[in-house]
Image (spheres, helix red, strand yellow):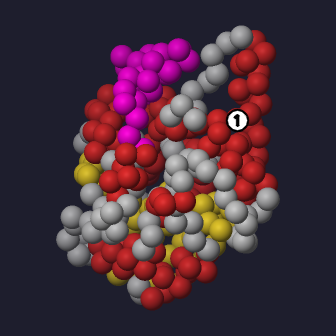
Amino acid sequence: MATVEPGIARHYDISGLEERIIAALADSGADVANLRASDLEAVDEFHIGGVAATKALVGQMGLKPGTMLLDIGSGVGGPARFVANNVGADVTGIDLTQSYVDIAASLSERTGMAGKTRFVQGSALDMPFADASYDAAIILHVGMNLPDKPGLMSEAARVLRPGGVFAVYDVMRLKDGALTYPLPWASDETMSFVATPDDYRSAAVAAGFSVIAERPRGAFAIEFFAAMRERLAAAQAEGSKPPPGVGLVMGEDARTKIANLTAALEGGILAPVELLLRLG
């Protein structure tokens, strides 16, 4: 695993990303001197469906104020801030990419949420946390970069308390078919480890989880990208800047990545899938 991790961290490392996020928000009329977590929702939820997908997933978890939540692969901190803000949970995020950890902490600072969120650099397959230290965990669009699903599940099971819920929202393979790269999570096939829902389920059960809910979100994903294309086309027609969105975090070839992913979604090869797991 150690061999693919540096490449994956580099794939996500975009220089000047925080400055680009703040500039895009300023362009869209946000008061960047007094940012609120909700101002960032268009740009800090780096997964299909953005904040609507986070809301749909987290809403099924039964989280309460003070819940100790772990966000595995926390990116620039959007889901962590969303849960801290809307549920009152205490959230720790872990991410492989150091610049994302730094940006996540900085954006939490800017939005007055430093006290409710913290971010650390590390691997999802070897987390620097004590056994049974969290009440619940989430992972959003991270498993596609993890070759070892059983390792992910056993590590999640280790850090969760008995009865803890682990909510997964990853892009999964629903049928055979070639994928075209680059994709949002991978420049080429050497860093893409898309697995089937069955792979996830069997790894989860082997680690001591039971599956409490499962939902494919392919239609939701196709609608999300169609709406994004419409917004971009409308901005182009008006000669205005497109509204900030997930493409900001994808770098220069964002359009190609989104087009390749959309083709796989429309072909029914890939779809984001929600899995809710309970430990024990």
Pick whichever, 90 or 269, lies toward us: 269
**Looking at the image, can residue 45 be seen?**
yes
Q: Is residue 42 left or right of residue 136?
A: right
Q: Residue furthest top?
A: 239
Give the quarter of the image for residue 225.
top right
Q: Is residue 174 above or below residue 234?
A: below
Q: Residue at x 29, y 33 (%)?
A: 106
**Magenta highlight range:** 12-36
Pick whichever, 252 or 190, lies toward us: 190
Pick whichever, 212 or 5, lies toward us: 5
Q: Position of residue 152 (x, y in %)?
A: 40, 72
Q: Is residue 178 above or below residue 115?
A: below
Q: Position of residue 192 (x, y in %)?
A: 52, 61
Q: Residue at x 20, y 71 (%)?
A: 130
Q: Which residue is mark 1?
A: 228
Q: Is residue 81 above or below residue 270?
A: above
What is the quadrant of the C terminus in the image? bottom left
Q: Secondary structure at mark 1?
A: helix
Q: Residue at x 42, y 87 (%)?
A: 208
Q: Residue at x 62, y 66 (%)?
A: 172
**What predominant SS class does the magenta segment belong to?**
helix
- Is residue 257 inside the magenta stretch? no
Q: Is residue 139 left or right of residue 264?
A: left
Give the quarter of the image for residue 15.
top left
Q: Amino acid at mark 1?
A: Met
Q: Position of residue 230 (x, y in %)?
A: 77, 31
Q: Is residue 235 left or right of residue 26?
A: right
What is the quadrant of the N terminus in the image? bottom left
- Is residue 27 inside the magenta stretch? yes
